[in-house]
Image (cartoon, rainbow, N blue to C red):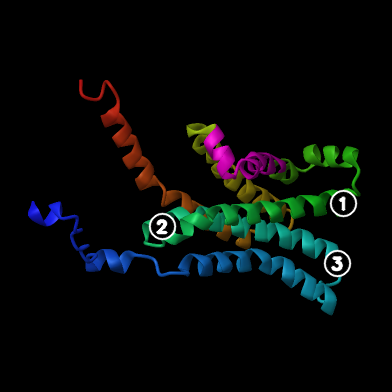
Amino acid sequence: MGARADGARPAASAPAPAAAARRPRPGGGRVLGACVHACGLFPLLRWIALGLAGGLGANPQEFLTRSSGLWALALLWATLAVTPARRLGWSGLLRHRRKLGLYAFFYTALHVLAWAVWDRGGAPASMWTDLWARDFIGVGALAVLCLIPLAATSTQGWMRRLGRGWKRLHMLVYPAAILSALHFDWMRAGKNDFLEPRLYAAVLALLLAARLPGWWRGRRAARRGSPGASG
């Protein structure tokens, strides 16, 4: 009592060794953020370098259309990989998930733009006809429609406005990913070249399966917390 009455503050206890070991190092978040930006900008910079060196191949338009689609898939998969990575101890990635998602949408937009301008000549009637004439185009359009609201509501302001609805809205990432994998698979079906699409599909299946334990625990917790759970 007397030691506190004279205004002296008790000495702060030293942090536990385990807690200190888990504490992120200063600047680690910035380094990880820089790595995410580097990964996101790498395809664009690579295209520019290849274009300047004449390395885009005999059909640059087709190369850029295909490449933008592949990078959109890879970055969308990387976005989905953040949650399993966090459970493995890579919790610092969580703060950069939005960046990965926006880069995935950026390359998706470039992929759509390439199709609209180079493949369809920028003609709305031709685009509309293609949506119904080729199944993989229609499925890809559905995937893009799922991604648009996710990109539009990715800011902190929209998180506050939508509240709990924000998380429900962003569940659209799962049908978007499944439709994207289907788009890729059906696109390659015309050439009977299924190896790469099936590899992407297998990785997606693993990423979705990694969420099942957490989803199941959440369902059980919700049932225990419901009013009728105790009866």
Q: Tell me the amino acid under the disc marked 2.
A: Arg
Q: Are marks 3 and 2 in contact (CB under 8 Å)?
A: no
Looking at this view, name the residue that lies furthest to the bottom: 53
Tell me the chief SS of the magenta region.
Answer: helix
What residue sits 61% from the left and 65% below the top? 37
What residue sits 32% from the left and 32% below the top? 222
Q: Nearer the viewer, mark 1 or mark 2?
A: 2
The residue carrying pointer 1 sits among few (fewer than 14), some (14 to 19) or many (20 or more) residues within 10 Å by Cα, namely few
Labels 1 and 2: the sequence-earlier one: 2
* Residue 42 falls in image quadrant: bottom right
Residue underneath mark 2: 86
Residue underneath mark 1: 117
What residue sits 54% from the left and 33% below the top? 162
- In percent of width and height, residue 219 lies at 34, 35
Labels 3 and 2: the sequence-earlier one: 3
Q: Tell me the amino acid under the disc marked 1.
A: Val
From this view, report whether residue 54 is shown above or below residue 102.
below
Labels 1 and 3: the sequence-earlier one: 3
What residue sits 65% from the left and 42% below the top? 152
Magenta range is 141-161
* Residue 170 falls in image quadrant: top right
From this view, report whether residue 115 is shown above or below residue 172.
below
**Residue 142 lies in the magenta-colored region:** yes
Residue underneath mark 3: 59
The residue carrying pointer 3 sits among few (fewer than 14), some (14 to 19) or many (20 or more) residues within 10 Å by Cα, namely few
Q: Measure the alpha-carbon separation of dots 1 and 3.
A: 15 Å
Q: Nearer the viewer, residue 213 or 82?
A: 82
Q: Measure the alpha-carbon separation of dots 1 and 2.
A: 39 Å
Q: Is residue 2 left or right of residue 35?
A: left
